[in-house]
Image (tube, rainbow, N blue to C red):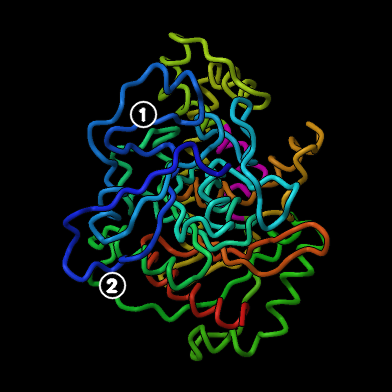
Amino acid sequence: SSFTERLRVVDPHPQERPPLHTVTVAVKDIMDMEGCTTGFGHPLWRLTHEPATTNAAVVQTLLGCGASIVGRTHMDELAWSLFGENHHFGTPPNPAAPGAVPGGSSSGSASAVAAGEADVGIGTDTGGSVRVPASWCGLFGIRPSHGRVSLQGARALAPSFDTCGWLTRDAGLLRRVGRELLDPRAAAGLPRREWRWLVAADAFDLADAETAELIFEAVSSRREDLARVFSPSKAPPQEVALDHLGGGFDKWFETFRVLQSREVWETLGPWVEEHDPEFGPGVKERFEYARVVPDSDVAAGNRMREGARRALTELLGEDGVVMLPTTPGPPPRRVSSPEVVTDLRARLLRLTSIAGLTGLPQVSVPVGRVRGKGPVGLSLLGPPDSDEDLLELAESLAEILLP
């Protein structure tokens, strides 16, 4: 099942003319809900914590906007995985690719939306945990600019990377939810952008040949229509090389791994030391590494992170949007070997760590299916706090790419 618990929660006194009336929402079991014990993807976490006395800020906002919460959803252990497989609770189905993983750690939220059991799936994204399941379940998904959506009442993994994101089956609803959840103060007074279209050619080198070809064909066959969505006064799509900016994919991946691991241990290490929980494969090894991350690696990682942030911000300016594949390919099968999973995780993080390190917003748009395997997504990476304009752009592109 996608759900840890099915509910029907509404606000008896929503705002007048609620903007999300009739919208159903599935909430990742990382968010507090009054009267529920947040499970955080691990049975021992649930046993060692009390029921919440208040709703998480995001939950309360959605209820106030007229949405109804239909359930709490499964997730990867303590949100520290990207595949959707949970050693304790199993793997939610992927309705878009039966027999394949749904992606994680917001696995249940994506599964519920893809199955039509909810209109919106609320998740969190630290290293790709909304974007990956969006790509693999054929959904729209956003990782917002860091800090644009409140995480009050959500369990933390690595706070300087953590964001609250959401998934939908259509771009219009993705944007509508953004109007309610995004803190408007960060974008106040900013003029509407006329986008400059950038294509990260070397990012496509990290994708499978089938995936790169599928995305290229989808974009190139509609190039004139897409160009009209961007500003006519700007130049045609410009190829850029991300691998030469502020360290490049390999160093960004290693920097993300080091800094995230240190923050995870600072955040969750005390609970792990006190309760000695059992972890599944992959998560166990990551916690073992997090315990011993050298201070010198953290110091070097912080310098690399600042360099990456400066380089990407300079490349984007106020009007640049970079197209890149969301994931290297379609979802793997549930029975994939540990070697395949390890290799794919490293390739995934070379793509997804960019937004995490820099705090930039990224939207994934479903672009097609690799024959016999499953969906893949095309991502739009924008400047800081360009979330609203990026959601508008994604909606316009979806009308062209998904007629």
Please name the residue shown 33% across and 43% down the image. 151
Q: Residue at x 61, y 83 (%)?
A: 403
Count the numbered circles shown.
Answer: 2
Image location of residue 317, percent across then percent down: 44, 68
The answer to whether the residue labelled 1 contacts the one labelled 2, judged by CB atoms less than 8 Å apart, is no
Residue 206 occupies quadrant: bottom right
Q: Nearer the viewer, mark 1 or mark 2?
A: 1
Residue 96 against residue 156 in the figure, above or below: below
Using residue 68 as the reference point, say whether residue 395 is left or right of it: right
Mark 2 or mark 1, which is nearer the start of the sequence? 1
Residue 186 left/right relative to 107: left
Task: Residue at 63%, 70% (x, y): give it.
Answer: 199
Q: Which mark is residue 210?
A: none
Residue 338 location in percent, x, y? 78, 31
The label shown at residue 37 is: 1
On screen, residue 304 above or below 20: above
For label 1, the SS is: loop
> Foreground residue, 345 or 135?
135
Say what secondary structure mark 2 lies in: loop
**Amino acid type shown at disc 2:** Leu
Region in magenta: 245-257
Prevailing secondary structure of the magenta residues: helix
Q: Amino acid at mark 1?
A: Thr
Front-most of 261 and 73? Answer: 73
Label 1, label 2: how many angstroms apart (C-alpha)? 40 Å
Residue under circle 2?
190
Q: Is residue 180 above or below residue 352?
A: below
Look at the image and say whether residue 95 sits in the magenta stretch: no
